[in-house]
Amino acid sequence: MVSIITMKKVLILIGILALTWLIWALKDNDSSAHYAIITSKISEDNSTDEYLLDIEYPKLVSNTEAYQFVNDDIAALVATSTVSFVSAVRDTTKYRREHPIDLPGGTQSNLYIRYRVATGTPEILPVIFMVSEYHAGAAHPNTAVITRNYDLRAGVIRTLDSLFVSGPSYLEEVALYAKEELTKKLVADGLPEEAVWLSGAEPGSDNYTAWFAGADGLHILFQQYQVAPYAYGIPEVTIPWNKLKSLKQ
């Protein structure tokens, strides 16, 4: 049987190896910066104002300040979402206490934020946030998708316009492909073609706020109720880069 002392030595060795790997990963090799992504969390169960915060967001740990703009932007995004939610909940909680009503499902509201880091292009790191708010008394939560495309080489957040050379007209071709792929996807998932709301995919900038530059193509995400009923969530379609090569920078 392995002794407790031996096990402690093994765990210490594993810890040293892990720390050595992280230092190596963040070391400046060939003048190119490296980073690691860790998950930061915010959790609060506020019984006074009757809300729950359950938030996870990424943070880049690096040997350089060049990526600080990513962390600053993400921190601002989380703060904006949280402050807006808490302010609204406090107002409604105060009103409910002044005008007592019976709410099915209880009186607690909640804010959930989750993220995923997609496989991007050589220069772009895409991060997709799902922000889900439930306000006490509502039939269901509402979820919004927010995307960021961080150009780590240039140190900027890329806009959709910046990917293309053809000015505003590029959106007409993007929308054409998006509507075609969207119809195929939703019909394949069982939605009648007439129930696909293609007006939500027309070439207006407001319809194309959620996107990311993936390794395999341009990914377009549509908000709840934008192109389909609530039950279909947030549809995502991918337009391969070879279909858009005549438009790209």
Image (cartoon, helix red, strand yellow):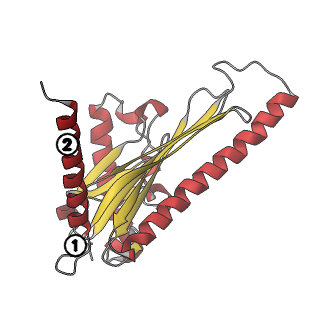
Spatial CA distance of label 1 from label 2 is 59 Å
Residue most toward the right?
Answer: 98
Residue corresponding to mark 2: 9
> Which one is in front, 47 or 130?
47
* Direction from residue 74 to residue 37 in the image, left or right: left
- Which residue occupies 45% across, 64% down? 71
Quarter assignment of residue 68: bottom left
Query: What percent of the width, then of the height, locates residue 221?
Result: 38, 50
Q: Amino acid at mark 2?
A: Lys
> Which one is in front, 23 or 119?
23
Query: What percent of the width, then of the height, locates residue 210?
Result: 42, 55
Residue most toward the bottom?
Answer: 31
Q: Amino acid at mark 1?
A: Ser
Residue most toward the left?
Answer: 1
> Which one is in front, 97 or 207?
97
Quarter assignment of residue 164: bottom left
Query: What percent of the width, then of the height, locates residue 116?
Result: 35, 49
Quadrant into which the C terminus falls? bottom left
Question: In terms of sequence position, does the residue under pointer 1 or pointer 2 come before the other?
Answer: 2
Label 2 neighbour load within 10 Å: few <14, some 14-19, many 20+: few
- Which residue occupies 27% across, 52% down? 238
- Which element carries disc 1, helix, strand or loop? loop
> Which one is in front, 128 or 202?
128
Quadrant into which the N terminus falls? top left
Residue corresponding to mark 1: 246
Which of the numbered marks, if any, corresponds to residue 81?
Answer: none
Q: How many labels, in total? A: 2
- Which residue occupies 60% across, 49% down? 82
Label 1 neighbour load within 10 Å: few <14, some 14-19, many 20+: few
- Which residue occupies 26% across, 67% down? 26
